[in-house]
Image (cartoon, grey):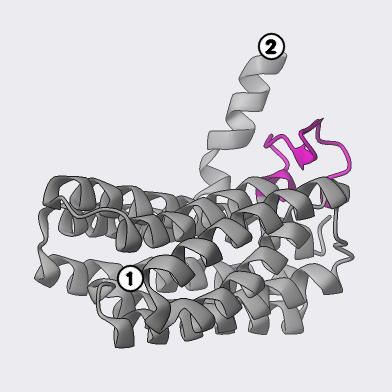
Amino acid sequence: MPAGYCARMGWFSRKRWGVEHAVFAAASAATVVGGVSGNEKLQRIAKPLIAPALAVRVLRRSRDTDRADTALMVAGLAAATLGDIAMIRSDEDRRILSGAACFGVMQTAYSSILVRRGARVSKPVAVQRAGALAGAAGLLAARSRSVAAPLAGYGALLATTATLAGDPALAPAARVRAGLAVPDTDRRSWLGLGGLIFTLSDGSIVVRRTLLKDEKSRAAAEGFVLTTYAVAQLLLVEGLLALTSRKG
């Protein structure tokens, strides 16, 4: 059987995807549609299902995972659910600050798992994340001072998670490009890309809030933010499950 066929089966084999992934995909798609169209009712139905669908995935894999890692993942996803609800109206200062607090808990949980599993700061990745954090903090300070300090604090937590997730040693067999593991059939190699996309998604929230005024461009930016958020969550959770699996 050709190697390429085996590799594709490694990505798409039914054994590696479950009903919870279908719920996740449907909820994510509906959330993006709701965000772009401005349909808040659709978002309120769909968005709170994104993280719980992944939490079901974590619980279904709990026999293969250390209890502490399972608890941290579930706690992080519970916090993300609250953050998702708060961020349905992300233009309101109170909402965006509540969302940042919730996602800060999630980032702390993810970082804790990564540290427990030996992740270390990789200099090339750290430099990239520091640059992104500095740019976002500068925009907020110049254009949105009311939320600048708290969001800069959240940005530091995000940068920590993204930097740890980008440690190429977490997926020792993966190829490395620009300091990051190239995603392959070993889901541990998805962690670096997940952290990078999460950084891009949250950075886009700052750009949307501070620079975009036209309704069409803001709607398009909202669709980008929501799509990249869902992809990043999937990559990070699947990567963490592979990293913490007792099956190796």
Using the image, tell me which numbered label, if any, was put on residue 235: none
| Residue sitting nearer the eye, 100 or 239 | 100
Q: In which quarter of the image is residue 129?
A: bottom right
Mark closest to the chain's N terminus, 1 or 2: 2
Crowd around label 1: few <14 · some 14–19 · many ≥20 (10 Å): many
Residue at image coords 73%, 68% = 64
Q: Report if residue 133 is visible in the image.
A: yes
Coordinates of residue 59 in the picture (x, y in percent): 57, 75
* Label 2 element class: loop
Coordinates of residue 74 in the picture (x, y in percent): 57, 80
| Residue sitting nearer the eye, 47 or 134 | 134
Q: Is residue 122 above or below residue 52?
A: above
Residue at image coords 85%, 74% = 116
Q: Which of marks 1 and 2 is in front?
A: 1
> The magenta stretch spans which residues?
170-190
Circle 2 sits on which residue? Answer: 2
Taking 6 as reference, is 125 left or right?
right
Q: Which amino acid, by three-letter code, is at mark 1?
A: Leu
Residue at image coords 25%, 80% = 92
Q: Is residue 182 magenta?
A: yes
Q: Report if residue 18 is visible in the image.
A: no
Circle 1 sits on which residue? Answer: 49
Coordinates of residue 101 in the picture (x, y in percent): 49, 86
Q: Quadrant of the C terminus?
A: bottom right
Q: In this view, does 215 lie above or below 87?
A: above
* Most distant residue in the top direction: 2
Q: Is residue 43 magenta?
A: no
Q: Which amino acid, by three-letter code, is at mark 2?
A: Pro
Q: Do the residues labelled 1 and 2 touch (CB within 8 Å)?
A: no
